[in-house]
Image (tube, rainbow, N blue to C red):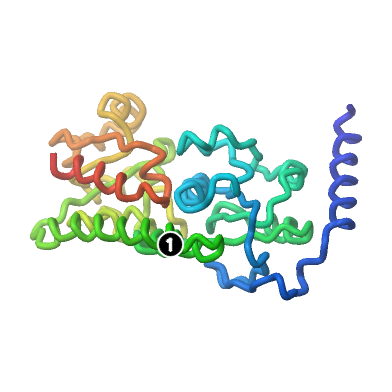
Amino acid sequence: MHPFLNRLSVAFFLLIALACSPDKRQPTGEERVWQDGLGREVRLPQQPRRVMAFASSMTEMLFAVCDTANIVGRTPQCDYPAGVYSKPIVNNYPVDYEQVLALKPDLVFTVEGITPLDVAARLEELGIPVYYQKYRSVEDIFKGIEDIGRIMGREQQANHLADSLRKQVKAIEQRYNQQAQKQRVLTITWSDPIYVYGQNTILTDQLRILGAENAVQEVFDQPYPALTREYVLKLNPDVLLGGSPERLEKEFFSLYPELRKIAAYHNKRIYAPTGNLIERPGPRVVESIVELEGFLYP
């Protein structure tokens, strides 16, 4: 089919779906009104039965809390737990509205910064509510788990999981809350330009729990700011995360040879965290903290 005709076909499908979808803007006796993490009012079925998430971290939360029969889809990035592979894939970058509509979810969960608000508005016009969560700390993740439990009628499972994770974090924190000298950790996500985990990321709280600190103390507008080599040299981190020593030698230090002066390079404190642990604010956050603990206190 010609690309122009294909676009017309998709647009026609969406118009028909919009025309035929029920108006969920008016509350009914079978609906409840929730306030999501962005302060938006979201009208949901009294008991959602078909749900999915547009963020892999939230897909992990759903599998940890919900009856898996209620989870109707996954994104291409979802790779944990193994049960995700039994679910159909829905493109989320960009969102494939036709795929979403075909799965008929009662609710789509997502995370601040993952799904643009205009995409959420379009889905809600099509009769599919979108519920955002946002996280600024490890505790916010646990509250998010409990939040899902309340919405999905799985409070007991969610509260048990959140309480168990809290206890594990508290035990770790108690081991390091008297650290006199805090290790300064810089975590890079890209080499050219140099993008890093900023102060306003959950990693900062994970490091605090471990008696360490994010080398990036300045708060930038973006959670993952781009830094100059001069800025990194001034930070002089004790620990560098982002890849194996061999990989970073080839892909990072070869580009910025002057950064071989930093303490992390000089003391061979360069480590490769597991990507789908450090990147995802989900129920495996304690596993991520334990992995970081191994880097900081080998």
Query: Residue at the spot x=49%, y=64% of the render?
Result: 147
Splitting the image into 4 quarters, where does residue 139 fall?
bottom left
Locate residue 15, reporting x and y percent: 88, 52
Query: Residue at the spot x=89%, y=39% of the render?
Result: 9
- Is residue 208 at all visible to an observer of this figure? no
Locate residue 96, reporting x and y percent: 72, 42
Q: Quadrant of the N terminus?
A: top right
Locate residue 19, reporting x and y percent: 89, 57
The reply, left or right, for residue 160 in relation to residue 104 is left
Query: 64 or 298, which lies in front?
Result: 64
The reply, left or right, for residue 258 in relation to residue 119 is left
Query: Residue at the spot x=36%, y=28% of the render?
Result: 251
Query: 177 or 73, which lies in front?
Result: 73
How many badges with numbers are in the image?
1
Determine whether 176 is above or below 88 in the image.
below
Query: Residue at the spot x=19%, y=35% of the render?
Result: 265
| Residue matched to label 1 | 156
Are there few (<14), some (14-19), or many (20+) residues within 10 Å of tag 1?
few
The reply, left or right, for residue 205 in relation to residue 62 is left
- Is residue 244 at all visible to an observer of this figure? yes
The amino acid pointed to by label 1 is Gln
SS under mark 1: helix
Q: Quadrant of the C terminus?
A: top left
The reply, left or right, for residue 148 in relation to residue 98 is left
Locate residue 89, reporting x and y percent: 63, 36
